[in-house]
Image (cartoon, grey):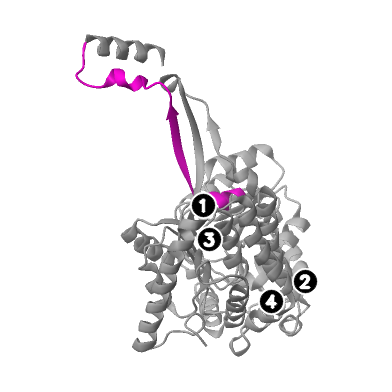
Amino acid sequence: MNATTRPYIGKQAMDEGNSEMARVFEAQRDTMLRWRRSTAQERIARIRKLHDAVLDYRVRIQEAGYKDFRKPPEEVDLTEVMTVISEARDAMRNLGKWMKPKHVMPTRLMLGSTSWIKVEPKGRCLIISPWNYPLNLTLGPLVSCLAAGNPAIIKPSEMTPHLSALMVELIRDVFPQAEVALFQGETSVSTALLELPFDHIFFTGSPAIGKVVMAAAAKNLSSVTLELGGKSPTIIDADADIRLAAQTTVWGKFTNNGQTCIAPDHVYVHSDIKDAFIQACVEAIKASYGDSAESQKDSPALARVVNQRHTQRIEALLEDAKSNGARVLYGGEVRQSDCFIQPTLLDSMPGESKIRQEEIFGPLLPLIAFDDLDKVIDQINAEPKPLALYYWGSSKERIDRVLADTSAGGTCINSCVVQYSHSRLPFGGVNNSGIGNAHGHFGFKAFSHERAVVRTRILGVKIFFPPYSNMTRRILNLLLRVL
């Protein structure tokens, strides 16, 4: 087991790990300089190797996903394999167009010049990925990084050991360390990596850790992309398609057992349809996962909470809500030893409940009745800006009101979570839910620098060289009238 695969525990191991990280970081400097001249064909070839390796590893990825989460193979394909393959194919199809210099028309002040934007690699990049979708949220950003012409060092989460170990093997099979390297370990490994002067850092995780990453990046003035999270609200209005809204919300919420950054965190449902919506949700849960807690525990379609610590955290949110007066409308059974929490619907949560204040990131779905849409908008605006906001209803006026009067990283109308799969849309948060965008051309731009280039043949600016004269003032007066 070498320094890129073992967890670093203790001072000696940490010293060895730091030395190895520094060695790889320095080795990637030569790659960074050489790849500045890389062609679209060369970059596509690297992405193609990664793409083919993911497909070759597909069955093993499914097996590792089951070991880490008891995640169904179909869900692994849908949320891990397919997303990376789609990202890679989109990049390979469009990279030549993305890399082309963009010529810019001169302004009146710059008449006689030729200008263009040259897209160039940022340099050495660090990708720190989370545990909830380990492959997707590691290799998806890596595709964008390679498309932009950058080498990378990757730090996956230690909380999904089987998928992380498999990525070590996959990366090692495809790339030399001077191009792409992966370091495993605890938080100390991330801390050590963040001390290095990377040119760009791409982090996916919680807002709290995002602030730590941003502070570390500031020491080296590294640019950052922060894909964070937050309490993404859903609004089910009176004229919504109740059955479809319930089925889709249940799917979006309980896929990966609620451990999804863009999952509906809580639902505002109009009082007129609340009972019907609850019934439709219960029917959707039973149709998807089984009629009882026992059958749901044994369901091959329901993933587990990632570990017992997170199971305890989610159970604590549930118990705190109940102690503050929340009612369990459906579900509520917890078996910590099996990391099982039943898909659960909750009602009547007072504002002081922790579940109203903290991102749930688990299979608990609070329902909040409303009559006045403006009050819902006020409640949403009183909280940090979410990564996603979902609205169900058919009134154009009310849809426009929600879009105009709220802010969120992304929004779906009469759907949820599918915005992540649309590679022609930017994916990212705003303020507390993230900085910057990912996916497709937006991911390519995140790892690229847009360099302004101006070429002049007649040096007209000489007329503004000192010493200044009456002629200078007359020319300035003319320009201020005609620009």
Q: CA distance from mark 1 to mark 3?
A: 25 Å
Start and end of the magenta stretch? 441-469
Q: Is residue 401 above or below residue 383?
A: above
Mark 2, residue position: 288
Mark nearest the camera among 4 and 3 is: 4
Helix, strand or loop status at disc 1:
helix
Mark 4, residue position: 61
Mark 1, residue position: 446
Of all residues, the one furthest to the left in this rendering is 467
Amino acid type indicated by mark 4? Ile
Q: Which residue is depicted at the point 42% across and 67% down?
A: 209
Q: Mark 1 and 2 residues: CB-CB less than 8 Å, in contact?
A: no
Amino acid type indicated by mark 2? Ser
Mark nearest the camera among 1 and 3 is: 1
Q: Mark 1 and 3 residues: CB-CB less than 8 Å, in contact?
A: no
Between 145 and 130, which is closer to the camera in this rendering? Answer: 145
Amino acid type indicated by mark 3? Lys
Of the image marks 4 and 3, the number of the one nearer the N terminus: 4
Q: Which residue is depicted at the point 63% across and 49% down?
A: 95
Mark 3, residue position: 231
Of the image marks 3 and 2, the number of the one nearer the N terminus: 3
